[in-house]
Image (cartoon, helix red, strand yellow):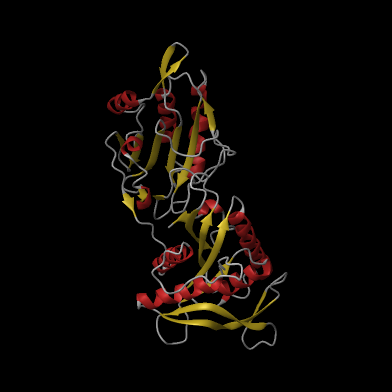
Amino acid sequence: MKIPNKIPDKIFRKIERVIPSYSYGKEYASSFKSVLVYVQNGLADETDLFNLIAKTIFKIQAEGSRKYPLLIFGFGDSTHLQHESKYFDFGYLNDAYNIEKVSNTISRISGDKKVKSTIIQELFPKTDNRSLYHGKTGLDKDDLLIIIGRENEVFFNIKLEQRLNNRTRSHILLVEFNKDKINWYFGNYKPKFINMKVSNPVMNICKNVSYSLIKMYALNSDKRLIFPRYRSGKIRVSEQEARFAFANEVENQDKYLYAIEVPTSKRYSGFSKDPAVHESSSNEGRSGSIDLSLYNSNNGKPFINIEFKSGQPRQASITKDILKLAYEPHKYGIFFHILEHSNGGTVDSLLKKINISFHTLKEKLSQKPQMQCFKILFVIIILEDGTDKITKKKSRCIWCEFGFIKNDKIKEQDFIEF
């Protein structure tokens, strides 16, 4: 593919016509408030193209008199945008001297690992005003968004369709290429949307159960299951309601057989400090149970194992459940957690405990005995979320699929909402 010396004149004129204007003292200037670059994973070698992109950015912003951040994100098969937690601060006379630095950063964030599916899952990483993004927390109507990817390989999650309004789309420059040429789209770009694929086959059941529990808590449910109350009149939220709601949904789906409190096939010990897995014939450890198991047939072999938790359980309790999900013989695991309330640190505190469990299992068990389930779907239901500053109280359902081989830890920005 031959890289041209500049962006096509026709495309540049289109961009010029929509650059936002603003007053600068008694004068007027024009430039985008921020420039964001999304680059597909696996394009690290396309440095000549990235050089052209960097030159184009400085050319577009040349008539501006205000400082602006340039932020670079990668996208691929992950549930969030990848970044280096920093930005470029531009708007100076010598910006053009940074072309190579910008190009190298785009290349580094893209990486050389090619992925099968490339879906943009969010428009901006989850952050707050204390972030390293110049206080920026989202994609603004006066921003320029540049997307770089291979031809027919750039997709958005269908859930972003409403957020990609006409104004936002009118400020997207798509740079799409194949082995022969580069295609430039601006103004007439029509994003391609796709439903995110999750390997766990009961994702829809998890989603339906989540909404059912939220309606129960809001006293707006058409189900017969309810949350009980303490003597004080306060609602009691526990994992039991989640388990029964899940079993009820499985009945409605009429697809899987299921069993509750299923005895484990292995024996376990040392959940607090030194977790260990023992074969069923061993005299060490003791047998446990799985909260709920789904079966494809009545052959006694679980297809999916599910553990339910609520509130902020002890570290050993979380380690025990993740240990069973990882080492019991089944294909998929689900860790289903219900929180009644949430503030700024609730989910983070829970994830710290989960990550300690991951680290403990990897450190203590290594590859022996053989792990049975390599992917766990984490679902967190927040019945009353106090982190929303506008509505004050808002329910949320978030999920993330964790791979033991691929990932070292799980972060809150890995989660996306149902």
Please state which of residues 213 and 288 is positioned toward the viewer in this rendering: 213
Q: Position of residue 199 (x, y in %)?
A: 42, 65
Direction from residue 142 to residue 341 in the image, left or right: right
Q: Residue at x 57, y 67 (%)?
A: 233
Counting from the top left corner in percent of width and height, residue 377 is at 49, 65
The quadrant of the image that shows the C terminus is: bottom left
| Residue drawn at point x = 54 percent, y = 74 percent | 240
Q: Is residue 199 visible?
A: no
Look at 39% across and 36% down and name the residue there: 146
Q: Is residue 361 above or below residue 155?
A: below
Q: Residue 196, relative to residue 55: is it above or below?
A: below
Q: Residue at x 52, y 62 (%)?
A: 402
- Say above or below: 64 vs 188: above
Most foreground residue, 119 or 353: 353
Q: Is residue 233 visible?
A: yes
The quarter of the picture where residue 273 lies is bottom right
Q: Position of residue 157 (x, y in %)?
A: 37, 51
